[in-house]
Image: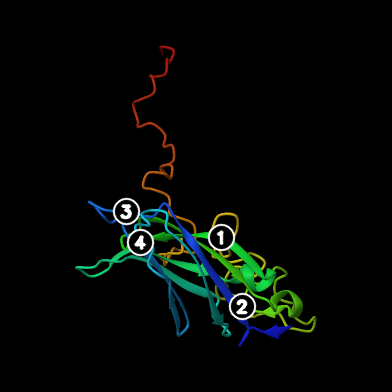
Amino acid sequence: MSGVQGQILEVTVVGCKKLKDTEWLSRQDPYVCLEYGSSKFRTQTCKDGGRTPMFQEKFTFSLMEGHTEMNVAVWNSNTLSNDGFIGYGRVQLYKVLSQGYDDTVWSIQTKTGRNAGGVQLIMYCPNSRNKGLAYNQPSAYGAPPPPYNMPPPTAPAPYLPPPAGYPAPSYPGAYPPTLYPPAPYPYGPYPLPPGAYPPSSPYYPPPAGSYPPGTYPPY
């Protein structure tokens, strides 16, 4: 398998869907920015594009080893003031690198993490199907087994990450990820809320005098 370094990736910005509206009195004029490594491209402004601008513009990137994400941002062009930020997202390249083609609407979010719509990108990698590009996708078969003569560990093994057979959650599927930097989450299970454990006090015998007095025959 050959590496991705220097291979060509074609990205067509088709348009946007259900964009957040940042204008009060008129229709917004959106444009899309793409960033991959040091390469940056911008579409033309879609005048009065509103919430559903169309672009149909194609850009060409040179792939780099270890770079499997592309940043996408949507802005509203303003004449008398600074351009307004609409939303930002991250585009995963695993599918296009392995299958050669990807047509997905990628979600974008505002600075506060709210949904800001989506950007439709059609990505094409001409050499991926013929040569099989190698990239840093988690293996579906896991790591190879250790040699049979490997001695058993003498101390408890440290924590290990999940096996490679379970792909990372950022792998694009039928529903793309949120494409917003996720907050770290704990590896272990969530602790139970207070009071979830049953009381640990055992049953004690009743105190003296709680039993009825015994009946004894008279002397």
Mark 3 or mark 2: which comes first in sequence? 3
The amino acid marked with disc number 3 is Asp
Work out how far the residue at label 4 is from the one at label 1, CA to CA, in angstroms. 24 Å
Report the front residue among 114 and 50: 50
Q: Nearer the viewer, mark 4 or mark 1?
A: 4
Mark 4 or mark 2: which comes first in sequence? 4
Work out how far the residue at label 2 is from the one at label 1, CA to CA, in angstroms. 21 Å
Q: Nearer the viewer, mark 2 or mark 1?
A: 1
- The image position of residue 89, as x and y in percent, is 43, 65
Question: Is the residue marked by circle 4 packed among few (<14), some (14-19), or many (20+) residues within 10 Å?
Answer: some
- The image position of residue 161, as x and y in percent, is 57, 71
Mark 4 or mark 3: which comes first in sequence? 3
**Residue at 60% over, 55% down:** 174
> What residue is disc 4 on?
47
Instruction: Specify the farthest residue to the front.
Output: 47
Whether residue 9 appears in this view of the structure is yes
The amino acid marked with disc number 4 is Lys
Looking at the image, residue 100 lies above or below residue 112: below
Report the front residue among 200 and 44: 44
Instruction: Specify the farthest residue to the left.
Output: 80
Work out how far the residue at label 1 is from the one at label 3, CA to CA, in angstroms. 22 Å
> What residue is disc 2 on?
136
Whether residue 139 appears in this view of the structure is no
Looking at the image, residue 146 lies above or below residue 89: below
Instruction: Specify the farthest residue to the bottom.
Output: 6
Dot 3 falls on a residue whose secondary structure is loop
